[in-house]
Image (spheres, rainbow, N blue to C red):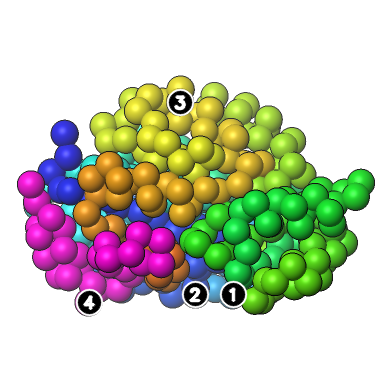
């Protein structure tokens, strides 16, 4: 049973910045333990890269993914320390990589297993498509049906398709670089208000990532999976997962299918999540939530000054 009528969500790749979480490490022993445990799990000084950079090292996919995960967990545990208990929301969810953070919050995976797993995931994603051969772009002002049509027209013999459905009117497309560029031009012809190429190292959440999904399933076998205590809202189909097997299947599909973030937000709000708390660097998800579930409060928790606000926010939602 949940203690709070809220959803707790975690950011994905792109939220990283050098120095994130350093204030939590200094202020909270529970946060310091998270960074120390992650360093030991991955076998190198991940925390040093998080706190000191250099930025080009932190933005490598194999580093970024565990870096965001452990920072998000460190922030969540600081808030839990102030609450005096582990927060138990109606749902946990995360955007892409953030879905793995949700599993740590829910006790499905240990921090060590999850850090090793997303380090491997990042490396596999980077290796799957040579640098420069894939691309992603944010398309503003088209709905899913229009985006699918645009991608089909642009693909030819290449891969191009929706990768993230982030909020109404914001869809990210992914695939071979040439196809994504063609899709951008067609999208503008079809009425897209803006097309923004994204600075990414690989074309995530498209068919080019299918081999990664197969290798990830092998990596899943090395982890100790527990049954979730709180439902996990899956990116792959925007439905709540309540067993470890269902979660693994959804994570497999998430690798090469679109992240249905907006649909997941609406599903959680429709099932009783009256507010959303985002734990981790940045505040992208809070903005997307406010544009998707109009009138539903969303709080971003990413610095020490936010901890008290988070406690009040969660306690205000207590059943």
**Mark 3 or mark 2: whose residue is earlier in sequence:** 2
Residue at 15%, 70% (x, y): give it: 308
Q: Are marks 4 and 2 in contact (CB under 8 Å)?
A: no
Helix, strand or loop at mark 4: loop
Residue 35, horizontal then vertical, whole percent: 38, 57
Q: Are marks 4 and 3 in contact (CB under 8 Å)?
A: no
The disc at residue 55 is 1
Residue at 31%, 39% (x, y): give it: 106
- 159 left or right of 124 in image: right
Viewer-side label of 3, 2: 3
**Mark 3 or mark 1: whose residue is earlier in sequence:** 1
Q: What residue sits right under mark 4 in the picture?
A: 305
Neighbor class of circle 3 (other Cα within 10 Å; few <14, some 14-19, many 20+) is: some
Please say if 19 is above or below 67. below
Does residue 291 belong to the magenta stretch?
yes
Q: In whole angstroms, how far apart are the C-alphas of marks 4 and 1?
A: 24 Å
Q: Are marks 4 and 1 in contact (CB under 8 Å)?
A: no
Q: In whole angstroms, how far apart are the C-alphas of marks 4 and 2?
A: 18 Å
Q: In whole angstroms, how far apart are the C-alphas of marks 4 and 3?
A: 37 Å
Neighbor class of circle 4 (other Cα within 10 Å; few <14, some 14-19, many 20+) is: few
**Mark 4 or mark 1: whose residue is earlier in sequence:** 1
Helix, strand or loop at mark 3: helix
Helix, strand or loop at mark 2: loop
Viewer-side label of 4, 1: 4
Helix, strand or loop at mark 1: helix
Viewer-side label of 4, 3: 3
Q: What residue sits right under mark 2 in the picture?
A: 18
Q: Are marks 3 and 1 in contact (CB under 8 Å)?
A: no
The disc at residue 151 is none
Residue 216, horizontal then vertical, whole percent: 62, 34
Q: Which residues are magenta?
A: 290-319
């Amino acid at each position: 049973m949940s203690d709070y009528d809220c959803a707790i969500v975690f950011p994905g790749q792109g939220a990283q910045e050098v120095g994130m979480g350093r204030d939590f490490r200094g202020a909270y022993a529970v946060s310091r333990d998270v960074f120390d445990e992650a360093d030991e799990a991955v076998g190198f000084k991940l925390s040093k890269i998080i706190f000191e950079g250099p930025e080009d090292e932190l933005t490598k996919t194999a580093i970024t993914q565990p870096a965001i995960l452990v920072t998000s967990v460190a922030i969540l545990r600081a808030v839990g320390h102030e609450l005096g208990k582990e927060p138990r929301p109606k749902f946990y969810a995360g955007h892409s990589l953030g879905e793995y953070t949700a599993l740590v919050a829910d006790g499905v995976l240990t921090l060590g297993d999850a850090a090793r797993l997303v380090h491997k995931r990042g490396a596999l994603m980077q290796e799957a498509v040579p640098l420069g051969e894939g691309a992603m772009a944010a398309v503003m002002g088209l709905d899913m049906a229009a985006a699918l049509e645009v991608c089909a027209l642009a693909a030819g013999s290449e891969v191009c398709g929706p990768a993230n459905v982030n909020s109404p009117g914001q869809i990210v497309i992914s695939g071979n670089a040439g196809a994504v560029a063609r899709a951008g031009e067609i999208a503008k012809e079809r009425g897209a208000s803006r097309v923004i190429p994204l600075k990414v190292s690989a074309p995530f959440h498209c068919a080019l990532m299918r081999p990664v999904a197969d290798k990830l399933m092998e990596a899943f076998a090395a982890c100790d999976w527990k049954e979730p205590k709180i439902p996990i809202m899956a990116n792959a189909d925007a439905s709540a997962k309540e067993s470890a097997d269902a979660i693994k299947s959804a994570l497999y599909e998430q690798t090469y299918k679109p992240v249905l973030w907006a649909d997941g937000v609406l599903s959680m709000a429709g099932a009783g999540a009256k507010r959303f708390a985002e734990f981790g660097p940045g505040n992208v998800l809070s903005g997307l939530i406010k544009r998707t579930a109009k009138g539903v409060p969303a709080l971003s928790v990413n610095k020490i000054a936010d901890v008290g606000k988070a406690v009040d926010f969660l306690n205000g939602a207590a059943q």
